[in-house]
Image: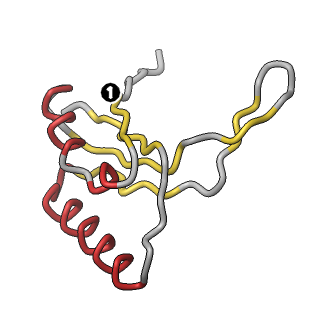
Amino acid sequence: MPEFIIIYHGAGQPESKEAGEAAKARWSKWMQDLGEDIVNFGTPFKAPTIVAADGSTRAGELSGYSVVKAADMDAALTIAKACPHLEMGEVEVAELMVFKRG
């Protein structure tokens, strides 16, 4: 089954400890609901920086990623549309290409 990366854009921090715990519970449920289809829980990013060809830098918007298995892009988008990150930002979905050594 194909694998898809879900890239998280934008970030917000919970306003309280209680809000943080509630957000953590929503993430846990989303990942638990995915079951075997979650390939890599991923990781959050801290302060991404974009580097241009001229060497200049600017703040990036990436805030993390996860990798999931899905039958096709439509199925991957259904998974992404249920992602708790949408409460604070956007997600981007792309199928991972498999290269075989030859």
59 in relation to 32, above or below? above
Observer-nearest residue: 32 or 26? 26
58 in relation to 46, above or below? above
Residue at x-position 36% and y-position 57%: 41
Quadrant of the rendering where the N terminus is positioned:
top left
Q: Quickly name the residue at label 1.
A: 95
How far from the left and from the top, in percent, is residue 53?
Answer: 80, 19
How far from the left and from the top, in percent, is residue 16?
Answer: 43, 81
102 in relation to 9, above or below? above
Horizontal side of residue 37 vs 54, given as left or right: left
How far from the left and from the top, in percent, is residue 65?
Answer: 43, 47
The total number of labels drawn is 1
Residue occupying the far top of the picture:
102
Neighbourhood count class around disc 1 (C-alpha, 10 Å): few under 14, some 14–19, many 20 upward? some
Residue at x-position 20% and y-position 35%: 76
Residue occupying the far front of the picture:
15
Observer-nearest residue: 3 or 49? 49
Residue at x-position 34% and y-position 84%: 18
Horizontal side of residue 7 vs 25, given as left or right: right
Residue occupying the far right of the picture:
55
Quarter assignment of residue 90: top left
Q: Say what amino acid the circle numbered 1 marks.
A: Glu
- Per the image, label 1 sits on a secondary structure element best described as strand
How has the structure been colored for display?
Answer: secondary structure
